[in-house]
Amino acid sequence: MFDWLRNRRNPVRERWALDTPLFRWDERGRDVFTIGNSYCGFLCLGGTGSGKSSVTARMLALSMLSAGYGGLVLSVKRELPVWQEYCRMTQRVADLRVVDHTCRDCAFNFLDELVTYQGGDVGLTENIVSLFMEIGSIGSRHGGSKGDAQGDNQFFHLATKELLRNLISLLILATGRVSIPDLCRLVSVLPRTPDNVASAKWRESNWCFQLLHALDTQPKPPSQQHDYEAILNYICYGFPNLAPRTQSSIAATFSGMADLFQRGLLHQLHSQGTSLSPRAIDNGAVIVLDLPLKTYGDVGLYCQLVWKMMTQNYLERRPVDANTTPAFIFIDEAQFFASQQADALFASTCRASRVANVLISQSVSGFETAFGSGAMGKALAEQLFANLSTKVIHATSDNGTAEWASNLIGKNYRLLGNSSCSQGPGGVDWAAMAGIGPSSQQTSSGFSESLQYDVEPSEFAYLRTGGLENGLLVDGIAIRSGRPFQCTGKTWMPVTFSQQ
């Protein structure tokens, strides 16, 4: 009759329970970083040589691998040897998957995969459009172009989205699939003048009109009939009536994004079949993108952006239960891959999908610059950082990062003492100094309250950075939202880790 009580006292513990510790912040173990904490986002900042990669990033990576996470690793410099060692140390070598220039067992046709993810879900077309535009925006920013959509740039940005929206919808409705070569072919055969549309001979030999005709003869539900009419209006009336230079500019904007995927390494990796996809993460795969920007430039950037955004898309769509494999997206020098809107949104919702979003960078200014500088860039960076609940700041000489961290830690009122002494009339009082007469000096003292930083910005420059000269010790300030550390009673605490 007491079985219910025994079961209550000894519940079956989940393998990946939210309160399972991954590592401990202090030697006494009073404060821990748990699996649940990892799902709330992690940001690590510090200057070059501060120890953020050799200590904090390493500790976090090893703890997640040991716990059985699958995940995705992006790289600016070559990270594969590091993660090979991590997998060896945690007995995860069999789970390591490498995407590199050999294209061996790592092809990923992301457009086919996106169609498979969503099937006939509402919003498929718009998601593909957004994927293309975001990749193009980050790629142009990396290449030195302005990433903001203002003035003429805004017009061509919107016009290119309209072009993509209609062509992708046409391909999906008429053929059930979409590919970059087909999109490029469609752009090249679009009618450029109303005379093209009116010519029966031209229509008979044009692939775009063949697709329209096939779609016209298919039975369609009301929603698809509406989409078909919008596509028909754009292709037959909207685009042909644009000025020739405008048509060429819109087509060129799309071609600039799509051309890299039609040749060389990106074509082999992303425009053919699929032998590896983000789905493998559910089985514990650790996918390392060994196409560092330092070596592969734009090709490496575009490939990694495809993987990053598709992995985010898939992980937030997968069904989640107690047995769902935890996942991580681990990005060093994360500002190079930062998305103005998608990253903050993903960081705010990935907890429900059991995803640890780990961003590592040198400074907050790197993100602000990536997001467009100025007030907007700062606001977007703050929006992203607000959704990363755990932050570790290592030694930095960047004033912006130090002040941001000090403001995040906060201020408190402190009592400051003061005193003053003034000489009376008549100059130096020699009698008083000799002890044979009363003093004519006037003195005063007191205390005042002043709002002061708990950690002054200048203190971040003095944190230890490891190496033999520091006894292999690395200092940092850990900050977490919502729950004070037991060691300090505050939402921040100084931490020290060993590089051994």
Image (spheres, rainbow, N blue to C red):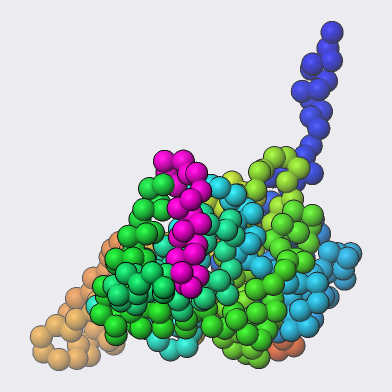
Q: Position of residue 43 (x, y in %)?
A: 56, 66
In the depicted view, which residue is nearer to us: 428 or 419? 419
Q: Which residues are magenta?
A: 204-224
In the depicted view, which residue is nearer to us: 3 or 107? 107
* Res. 57 in view: no
Which is the main secondary structure of the residues drawn in magenta?
helix
Q: Is residue 162 left or right of residue 318?
A: left
Number of callouts: 0
**Image quadrant where one finds the N terminus:** top right
**Residue 237 location, quadrant:** bottom left
**Residue 191 location, quadrant:** bottom left
* Res. 17 in view: yes
Q: Position of residue 336 (x, y in %)?
A: 53, 79
Q: Position of residue 295 (x, y in %)?
A: 66, 91
Position of 225 relative to 144 (above/below): above
In the depicted view, which residue is nearer to us: 33 or 186? 186
Position of 187 relative to 4 (above/below): below
Q: Residue, x 52% and y 76% (percent of image)?
A: 185
Q: Residue, x 82% and y 68% (percent of image)?
A: 96
Q: Position of residue 478 (x, y in %)?
A: 57, 64
Position of 478 relative to 297 (above/below): above
**Image quadrant where one finds the C terminus:** bottom right
Was residue 214 drawn as part of the magenta stretch in this picture? yes
In the depicted view, which residue is nearer to us: 396 or 11? 11
Q: Residue furthest left?
A: 425
Was residue 407 drawn as part of the magenta stretch in this picture? no
Q: Is residue 317 left or right of residue 366?
A: right
